[in-house]
């Protein structure tokens, strides 16, 4: 990867214990997200719900390469890698890993999408966005944050969050990978939000693990955490949301809207293209929206949707089908499954045989263009 600009399109911070307590109205009391020590481990609580996976969010970085049997879901905040919550240590780890810039997502904040009460959740997201802005301000040329917003029935509030994010210099905004009960992203209520994101040129992220409370939970799911089976099939929900958007013509009506599906890898996408197009062509009653001319759903997928992945060699093999300019590599630092601290070796392996110009796009060029790095 010598002389190539390497940008991780999917890295994370690990929220410090005081983040929400310091920045939220005390009126919420112990509903404010806070850390509680229970036995050997620390757990996040929010709105009286116990969240989880503190360990795999930040205490197990790098273990997969040497001691995968030691990766745990639980953990102690004291054992979190400092780069998770300290910008200086974060950038030092980027240097160690040979990464020039990181696009930053939350850790426990992903699970906050499981909080049902929209009033407190909107304030949780606001507190997080303020903290993340401060975090990135220490190294603005190397750290860019993705703000969080809540839609549900309050689309105007979501549009206001888009405007705040643009003013604050965020790289994008994350919405839930699948919306609230009885909502789908093909519904007209979302049209003003898509319009605002297009007008502000704010990319929208659909990150794994951010479903709103709904039928998305299965019998194998404990609380808001994923079982092994749910993890294996994590791309199901983003496929559903993208299908709703694509088959209802969202991207035809908003041709400059940019959506990034994050941490679902790639190999499923060629099959998904085929299913989209076959359904559109053969099942008019199930896909009644008709595109102008001879356009197909997969055409809009290639034009408007980007894919942030870690190390899917099968997906890289099929890059010409997916679209080389749509691929965004990410390290997932400092989570247990991250490529840190061996990102260089992994990139060399999964990109073996890929032409140099395409490598440059995948490891950083596409992200630099999408997220406006100078």
Image (spheres, grey):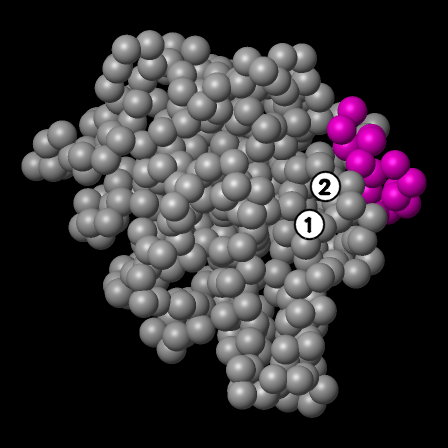
When the figure is inspected, residue 59 is found, relative to residue 111, above or below; the finding is above
Q: Residue at x 76, y 28 (%)?
A: 346
Residue depicted at 68% across the width and 18% down the height: 65
Quadrant that contains the N terminus: top right
Closer to the chain start, of discs 1 and 2, is 1
* Residue range corresponding to the magenta coloring: 345-360
User: In this orientation, does residue 111 appear?
Assistant: no
Quick check: 17 above or below 365? Answer: above
Q: How many marks?
A: 2
Residue 219 percent location from the top left of the image: 38, 46
- Say if mark 1 contacts mark 2, CB within 8 Å: yes
Q: Is residue 293 left or right of residue 109?
A: right
Q: Main secondary structure of the magenta part?
A: helix
Q: Residues within 10 Å of mark 1 (few under 14, many from 20)?
A: many
Residue 353 in magenta stretch? yes
Looking at the picture, tell me which residue is in the foreground, 176 or 325: 176
x, y percent for residue 64: 63, 20
Q: Which residue is mark 2?
A: 312
Residue 100 appearing in the image: yes
Q: Which mark is residue 266?
A: 1
């Amino acid at each position: 990867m010598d002389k190539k600009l390497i940008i991780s399109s999917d890295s994370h911070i690990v929220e410090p214990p005081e983040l929400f307590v310091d920045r939220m109205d005390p009126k919420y009391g112990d509903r404010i997200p806070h850390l509680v020590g229970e036995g050997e481990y620390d757990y996040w609580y929010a709105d009286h719900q116990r969240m989880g996976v503190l360990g795999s969010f930040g205490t197990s970085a790098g273990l997969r390469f040497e001691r995968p049997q030691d990766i745990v879901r639980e953990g102690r905040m004291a054992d979190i890698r400092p780069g998770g919550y300290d910008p200086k240590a974060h950038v030092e780890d980027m240097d160690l890993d040979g990464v020039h810039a990181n696009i930053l997502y939350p850790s426990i904040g992903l699970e906050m999408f499981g909080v049902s009460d929209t009033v407190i959740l909107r304030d949780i997201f606001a507190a997080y966005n303020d903290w993340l802005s401060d975090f990135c301000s220490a190294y603005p040329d190397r750290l860019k944050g993705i703000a969080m917003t809540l839609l549900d029935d309050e689309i105007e509030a979501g549009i206001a969050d888009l405007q705040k994010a643009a003013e604050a210099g965020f790289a994008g905004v994350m919405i839930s990978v699948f919306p609230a009960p009885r909502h789908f992203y093909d519904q007209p209520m979302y049209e003003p939000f898509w319009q605002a994101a297009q007008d502000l040129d704010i990319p929208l992220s659909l990150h794994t693990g951010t479903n709103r409370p709904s039928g998305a939970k299965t019998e194998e799911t404990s609380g808001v955490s994923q079982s092994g089976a749910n993890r294996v099939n994590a791309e199901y929900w983003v496929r559903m949301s993208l299908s709703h958007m694509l088959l209802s013509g969202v991207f035809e009506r908003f041709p400059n809207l940019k959506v990034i599906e994050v941490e679902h890898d790639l190999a499923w996408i060629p099959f998904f293209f085929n299913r989209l197009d076959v359904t559109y062509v053969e099942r008019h009653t199930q896909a009644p929206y008709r595109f102008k001319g001879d356009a197909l759903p997969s055409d809009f997928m290639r034009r408007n949707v980007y894919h942030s992945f870690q190390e899917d060699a099968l997906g890289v093999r099929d890059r010409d089908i997916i679209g080389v300019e749509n691929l965004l590599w990410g390290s997932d630092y400092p989570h247990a499954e991250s490529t840190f601290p061996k990102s260089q070796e992994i990139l060399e392996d999964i990109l073996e045989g890929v032409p140099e110009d395409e490598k440059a796009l995948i490891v950083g060029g596409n992200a630099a263009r999408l997220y406006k790095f100078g």
